[in-house]
Amino acid sequence: VQLQASGGGLVQAGGSLRLSCAASGGTFSTYAMGWFRQAPGKEREFVAAISWGVGRSYYSDSVKGRFSISRDNARNTVSLQMNILNSEDTAVYYCAADKRTPASISKASDEYDFWGQGTEVTVSS
């Protein structure tokens, strides 16, 4: 499975960005999908995840109410709509696919089997 993340860029605080992740080479609809991020000098952290099928979602406390994850199984894509961005959201964002436990929503990075290359988000204050 190959994952290609896109949509990152430079945005002012309070603004919005929409990240996308395109999957190929696998059965996308059967995977749970997640977004993680890694800020400079920090460890990778969970952002949001969505289960397979109808797509139950789960968010970290730091983004709940501001970010929204969605999936389009017909297009093999998962998106992350990010609103009311602040400087603490500055990071490289990675999408990931969970093939082994798709019905669950995990925030543990080791539960994910495939990773994209990351897309950089910079929020200026």
Image: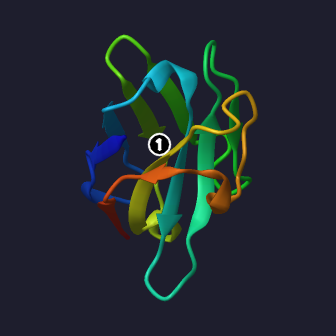
**Numbered disc total:** 1
Q: Is residue 72 left or right of residue 8?
A: right
Position of residue 47 relative to residue 41, above or below, is above
Q: Is residue 112 left or right of residue 95?
A: right
Quadrant of the image occupied by residue 54: top right
Say few, some or many: other residues with alpha carbon within 10 Å of mark 1 (under 14 / 14 to 19 / 20 or more): some
User: Which secondary structure lies at badge 1?
Assistant: loop
Position of residue 39 relative to residue 103, above or below, is below
Quadrant of the image occupied by residue 64: top right
Quadrant of the frame with the C terminus = bottom left
Quadrant of the frame with the N terminus = top left
Q: Looking at the image, which residue is at 55% across and 30% down?
A: 31
Q: Looking at the image, which residue is at 27% across and 53% down?
A: 8
Q: Using the image as rendered, state which of residue 125 and residue 30 is in the foreground.
A: 30
Q: Looking at the image, which residue is at 74% across and 53% down?
A: 61
User: What colour scheme was applied to this rendering of the protein?
Assistant: rainbow
The percent coordinates of residue 87 (x first, y second) are 46, 69
The percent coordinates of residue 12 (x first, y second) are 32, 59
Position of residue 27 relative to residue 50, above or below, is above
The percent coordinates of residue 41 (x first, y second) are 49, 89
Q: Using the image as rendered, state which of residue 119 and residue 103 is in the foreground.
A: 103
Position of residue 67 relative to residue 37, above or below, is above
The percent coordinates of residue 25 (x first, y second) are 31, 32
Query: In the orientation shown, which residue stands out farthest toward the bottom?
Result: 41
Q: Which residue is mark 1?
A: 83
What amino acid is found at the position of numbered circle 1 in the picture? Asn
Q: Using the image as rendered, state which of residue 2 and residue 18 is in the foreground.
A: 2
